[in-house]
Amino acid sequence: MEHLLPALDLVLNLNVGLAILVGTAFGIVMGALPGLGTVLAITIALPFTFSMAPAPSIALVLAIYCSSVYGGSISAILINTPGTPQSAATVLDGYPMALRGDADKALGWATIASLIGGLFSTAVLVMAAPRLAQFALSFGPIETFALIALALTCIAGVSRGSMINGLLAGILGLFLATVGTDTMTGFVRFDFGVFDLAAGIELVPLLIGLFALTEVFARLTMPQDQTGDLEKRIGFSVAPLKEWLLRWKTLVKSCVIGTLVGILPGTGASTAAFISYSEAKRSGRYRDKLGTGEPEGLVASEASNNAVTGGALVPTLALGIPGDPSTAVMMSALIIQGIQPGVRLFADNPELMYGSFIVLAACNIVMAVMGAAAAPALTRILRMPEPVLLPLVLVLSIVGAYGVRGNPFDLLTALVAGIVGFFLRLCGVPMAPIVIGMVLGPTFEENLRQGLILTDGSFLAFFSGHPIAVVLLGVTFVVVVLALVGEARRRGEASATTAPIAG
Amino acid sequence: MRRDRLDLIFGAAMLVLAGLLWREAGALDAGNTGFFGFGFDPGFFPRILLGFWAALSLVVLLRGLRGSALRVQAPSWPQLASLMALTAGYVLSITLIGFAFASVAFLLILLPVLGYRRPLVVLPVAVIFPLLTWYVFVFILQIILPVSPWFDRI
């Protein structure tokens, strides 16, 4: 507490304020543009921090970090294209809300949930950073494998219509993640002699193809229902407190899940969002409506992915271990300023660290205000005639796919994912499980194989001497059984009617 | 379209694909027994996935054989074919004539094809939007986009 006043003195100045404003605006735009995202946004800003003082430079990077995660939800809600992979779960309920004419409410739910998630994790960061970092070290490969197994159960939750098709899509996603160089042996898998496949399939072009391109193809060639005639409300609308209170459990759980997952190195915001979504699907008040445009799904995804921002800073700052590429780039910003993250950081630079926490809280508040201010202009996009809007979405998606790493092969990835994805949708295969498999696949495989090395190839040994893993795998088993029972109950209820294609 | 026929096609296609990929995965363990003799070969995890893949494909196939009266909305096939062909042409032309020119041409063709033919809207939208996107990417974000053979930066 004695460091709080000097920390306030350090950050309460015009340069820090300007850095937060500029960083937040830039981060929201970069997050909202499909294919760009957090790492690229921070990388672009990094050269500007060379000539800045430590406090404003950290403020700039933190503002970009927070707001780019939030920005991804804007395009996810408005055009069914997650601007960043972290917002992939936001699409599931955000876009159906926008289709229903409730884009203003969807943005309201997403913004406030992001704000609460971000502030919650900041508070955790302030109070418990060094101790939590030590706890994270008790997560070995077996515990991480069990955690990812639990996250994969959300495939059952997003497989509306046919769980078999959803599971098959999830397997397809996990398989696509194995294409390219095997991280454990360096052996190239399933490249079929194509040089570009040796580096694996890039996630963002695949996301763009599966969500944006298939949606454009479907909307322009399928008979549409009455949604086109609905009044599309523009602006920003925050739901009444009563509505929030009805979903408070999901909000709190998602904040906790996001923060804890953020603390674990190598997991990330996409994983956290899907774990929270899975938990909301299992225990949420409106679990049966999730995936149809239910705000609880938005709350789960957005509170969680923004709670990761504070959580991910715990190992980065307290241990010097960056959990993902975004925090790795942020760590370089600190090192540029001559600050070495690690166990000595809090002892050596207490004012700067506590100042950073204050800045992080301020960034979340500025992010929510800017999001609300920009919403009326953003939601106007939906009032454009579809034959004009959708081709523009196509162009923006294609350039986004290219912009990830400037490789023309990514254009082909997006195109093929779009065409194949459309036919998969026609066959009743949901898109979300493919993405869930792609996101979680590499961590899942790596930790399974590392765990098997530790146990001399015995999977049964995962259940002895690993209490955290046993609990997580037990919950996974229960969730799978409940999902199968639910599916069995629903079977036979389907009537002989015309079904919409999967989304 | 009938759902059971789609299930038949989808299940059969996925089953064949699983078989082909299994052959590829089987070749992965030749001379690659894990990491310096530890652990499992690179084909270990893909083969587990392909086992589940094949089993689930079989379930879909059997569901299709069992028959169902459920129907699925069909797209307008000519419109779908033209839209996909135009998009594929656009993606390929980006690397040939650059992002800006390919995008302008794509929008000038696609908007009228989709039934939007007001020149006062089509022309400005088709020209201004791609150029604005190009400017933001190249000059503000410093991301190099494919260029045409005629100019240095566009």
Image (tube, rainbow, N blue to C red):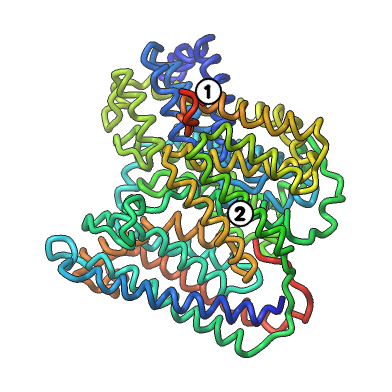
Pointer 2: residues within 10 angstroms few (<14), some, or many (20+)? few
Q: What residue type is labelled 1?
A: Gly
The residue at 61%/27% (across/down) is B131
> How far is mark 1 from mark 2, CA to CA?
40 Å
Query: Farthest residue toward the front?
Result: B150
**Residue tagged by mark 2?**
B85
Query: Farthest residue toward the top?
Result: A14
Q: Is residue A142 visible?
A: no
The residue at 27%/64% (across/down) is A449
Q: Which amino acid does label 2 sit on?
A: Ala
Circles 1 and 2 in contact, beta carbons < 8 Å: no
Pointer 1: residues within 10 angstroms few (<14), some, or many (20+)? many
The residue at 79%/32% (across/down) is B121
Q: In the structure shown, which secondary structural element does the residue marked by tag 2 occupy?
A: helix
- Name the image quarter holding residue A116: top right
What subunit carries mark 2?
B
**Residue tagged by mark 1?**
A23
- Name the image quarter holding residue A448: bottom left
